[in-house]
């Protein structure tokens, strides 16, 4: 696979950029890094994770389920602890924690309804 000089990243288009950024900072402990004005880029590895304003012409409210068919899996050493904190804050859990080949794994819905899976095995 050809590697480009720019950093790899995953970005989600969101309805409310400040609220989504605050959600990921609070619940996943992500720290911001420098990024463009239309996005909040977090210091994650191996790829940067970002939330961004919708691209021109994109109406997020016209889509019944954002991210349908896309799997976003992120490593969290204490997936159960993150799960418990999300539940305590009323964040929807869409797949209960299970133990499997990727360690403790569960899925939650972010403020825009994106399904994010956390797993404990690196």
Image: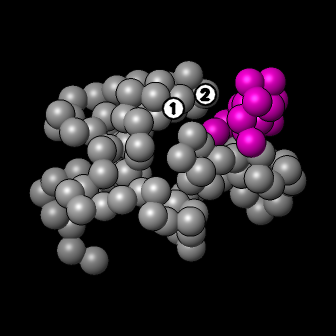
Tell me the number on the disc at residue 24.
1
Q: How is the image coloured?
A: one colour
Residue at 41% across / 46% down in the picture? 14
Judge whether residue 122 is colored magenta. no
Residue at 46% across / 56% down in the picture? 61
Provide residue 37's location: percent of width, then percent of height: 17, 34
Provide residue 114's location: percent of width, then percent of height: 56, 53
**Span colored in magenta:** 76-92
Structural crowding at the residue carrying mark 1, measured as other residues with C-alpha within 10 Å and reported as few (<14), some (14–19) or many (≥20): some
Between marks 1 and 2, how big is the CA–CA gap? 5 Å
Tell me the number on the disc at residue 109.
none
- Of the pair 16 and 70, the residue shown nearer to us: 16
Residue at 27% across / 39% down in the picture? 39
To which residue does mark 2 refer?
27
- Of the pair 94 and 119, the residue shown nearer to us: 94
Q: Contact, CB < 8 Å: mark 1 with mark 2? A: yes
């Amino acid at each position: 696979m050809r590697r480009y000089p720019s950093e790899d990243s995953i970005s989600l288009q969101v309805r409310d950029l400040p609220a989504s950024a605050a959600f990921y900072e609070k619940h996943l402990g992500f720290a911001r890094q420098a990024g463009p004005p239309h996005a909040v880029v977090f210091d994650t590895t191996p790829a940067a994770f970002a939330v961004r304003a919708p691209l021109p012409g994109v109406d997020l409210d016209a889509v019944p389920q954002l991210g349908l068919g896309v799997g976003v899996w992120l490593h969290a050493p204490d997936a159960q602890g993150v799960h418990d904190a999300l539940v305590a804050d009323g964040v929807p859990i869409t797949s209960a924690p299970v133990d499997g080949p990727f360690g403790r794994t569960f899925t939650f819905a972010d403020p825009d309804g994106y399904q994010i899976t956390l797993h404990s095995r690196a």
